[in-house]
Amino acid sequence: MYKQIAAELLAKSLNKSAEEIEEQMERPKQLQHGDYAFPCFALAKEKRQAPQIIAAELANDLSHDVFSGITARGGYVNFKLDKQIAGSRVLRSIHQQRERYGSAAVGQGQVVAIDLSSPNIAKPFSMGHLRSTVIGNSISLLLEKQGYEVVRINHVGDWGTQFGKLMCAYEKWGEEAKVRSNTIPELLKLYIRFHEEAANDEQLEQEGREWFRKLEQGDAYANKLWRWFRDASMEEFERVYQLMGVRFDSDAGEAFYNDKMERVIEELEQKKLLSWSEGAQVVRLDEQELPPSLIKKKDGATLYATRDLAAAIYRKETYGFSESLYVVGHEQSLHFRQLKLVLKKMGYEWADGISHLSFGMVLQDGKKMSTRKGKLVLLDKVLKQAIQLAAANIAKKNPELADKEEVARQVGVGAVLFHDLKHERIRDIEFSLEDMLRVEGETGPYVQYTHARACTLLTKAGDIRCDSEVAAAIAADAWPILSLLMQFPEAVADAIANHDPSRIAKYVIDLAQAFNSYYGKVRILDEDDDLGARLAIVKAVAIVLAEGLRLLGIAAPKQM
RNA sequence: GUCCCAGUAGCUCAGCUGGAUAGAGCAACAGCCUUCUAAGCUGUGGGUCGGGAGUUCGAAUCUCUCCUGGGACGCCA
């Protein structure tokens, strides 16, 4: 808003369009230089004049009520906001809008389908699925803040050859009682054993495929086993979701599309997109210089491409989305490129609305973690440790706290989620339990702690009224905070535009740091004329921190 | 071999569509709790931005090339 005003002033003086000028404007790296800056280097070339001189002349010419100073420095025109005016204004709007501050209506009336979490049945909930879950959840919350209607879909991995293998292993070595009492770990053991033995036994792979074929053709016993494995697994996943506070609108997994694939295959045939290759049926993507998409195996069984095609079409027909997002690991990017292209070849222009929001992998010693080799860290255990640690901290620092257990859960989970979300989405993360459990520095608990501090101040202030009209001196002291508060809507928009929650995580860290620094310097509850103004700042910080954390899917306890 | 990511301080990472002396956190060291939660604050040290070339008034940022790491590349998902 202020940037626009500055751009208009410049535009008038330079006889250029305000949009063009606004494009070029930036935020100075150092807050002391000002709040907005316009670099004159491009103009220097145009006008054949030193940028310093141009900047000086412009600065001399311009003035406006919202800017307390417009000065030239090193080829830039720097705009300094009037701290009192701008500060009071942002406080007013935060107090009025509260948690709606930073919201927008750009998504009004549009539906976004989002595929997230999607763990595999009979396998433990891995770190990779944690990423998909928390990133997807945060993106959902962000989209809702912009007015979109979001459909969260947990595309559970409950079908495929792996189940054949698992059943095969269960039939050979499994014991019912053991599996009943300890489902996922026991099934995992069987799965790992299958792969160990299959390494020296071609025959076994065959048997596994045969079991899957039976399952797909409706064999009663195979289906009974399958249902058992699925139900038991879902129960365990549900516990983790509850712990993390994540919910879904649909858990239609892969099996859900079993009866919806035939139609797709027929359609592909009818549109003459299928061709035979080495006994399998594929859609060629030669023009796009991509490998073909495999639709049907030589034994007639379907593949994940078939299923994902059916799912994409089903979602379009059921939800009428304008965008369909897939929060799935980077390793599957080829698959999603193929999926989109095949849909386009089928004539579905809406495939343009499909985006694969890939994310980096969780690596261990620089390598991918593998289920088969059993090198896996269980999310369940990590969360439990984090909660225990939070509980220990509470016992030490705030033993009188009411609701200790719930706060410990919120803080423990907050630590793990924040650690994941603060990394840029696309980057690989090196697994480190130590880092995930950390509570100091750039961490979730640090932000939560800062929020709790602010809340305590507000509680202690009791009936004293907040006063959004801050005096110049207060605004100057708290300027780093006020400046950040003004930037929150941009941070939200930025996070959504890039589908990247890490932008919010970084913002919230910056705001917490600015607040803690202020807290260290200024006694907030001193009784003087400015008390109401300081409280207004504290309250605004509490609102924005809580809302920022909420957008990350993290709770903001009032005390901890 | 082909394609897709990435390479910034000892470690983990920021650095927006190219712009003002490259920033945090952790770890190390030195300070700050008889007054609002020390899960905090203040300060110090620490960098050939993987190498090279190019575009530009200006490059960590864009292009090319090489090196390194990760991933994908037909019947797993």
Image: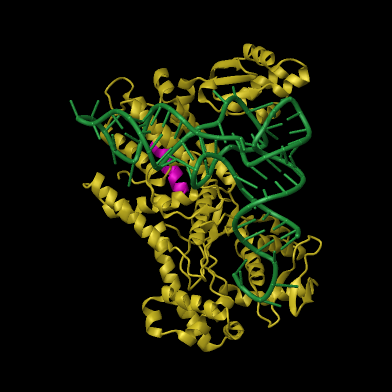
Chain colours: A yellow, B green
**Is residue A546 in the magenta section?**
yes
Quick one: A203 or A207, which is closer to the camera?
A: A203
Q: Which quarter of the rendering shows the C terminus of chain A?
A: top left
Picture residue at 36% right of the left edge, 39% below the top: A450
Picture residue at 77% right of the left edge, 21% below the top: A46
- On the picture, is A401 further left or further right than A67? left
- On the picture, is A160 further left or further right than A20? left
- Corner quadrant of residue A275: bottom right
Quick one: B53 or A479, which is closer to the camera?
A: B53
- Tell me, yes or no, if residue A98 can be seen here: no
- Residue A430: x, y in percent? 50, 53
- Residue A27: x, y in percent? 58, 28
- Residue A152: x, y in percent? 53, 59
Q: Which residues are magenta?
A: A542-552
- Tell me, yes or no, if residue A40 can be seen here: yes
- On the picture, is B32 further left or further right than A187? left
Picture residue at 75% right of the left edge, 68% below the top: A292
- Residue A508: x, y in percent? 45, 40
In this rendering, the count of numbered labels is 0
Q: Is residue A518 above or below residue A384?
A: above
Quick one: A150 or B20, which is closer to the camera?
A: B20
**Is residue A45 in the magenta section?**
no
Q: Is residue A277 above or below residue A74?
A: below
Q: Is residue A225 above or below residue A118?
A: below
Quick one: A22 or A126, which is closer to the camera?
A: A126
Q: Which quarter of the rendering shows the N terminus of chain A?
A: top right
Q: Is residue A482 above or below residue A456?
A: above
Q: Main secondary structure of the magenta part?
A: helix
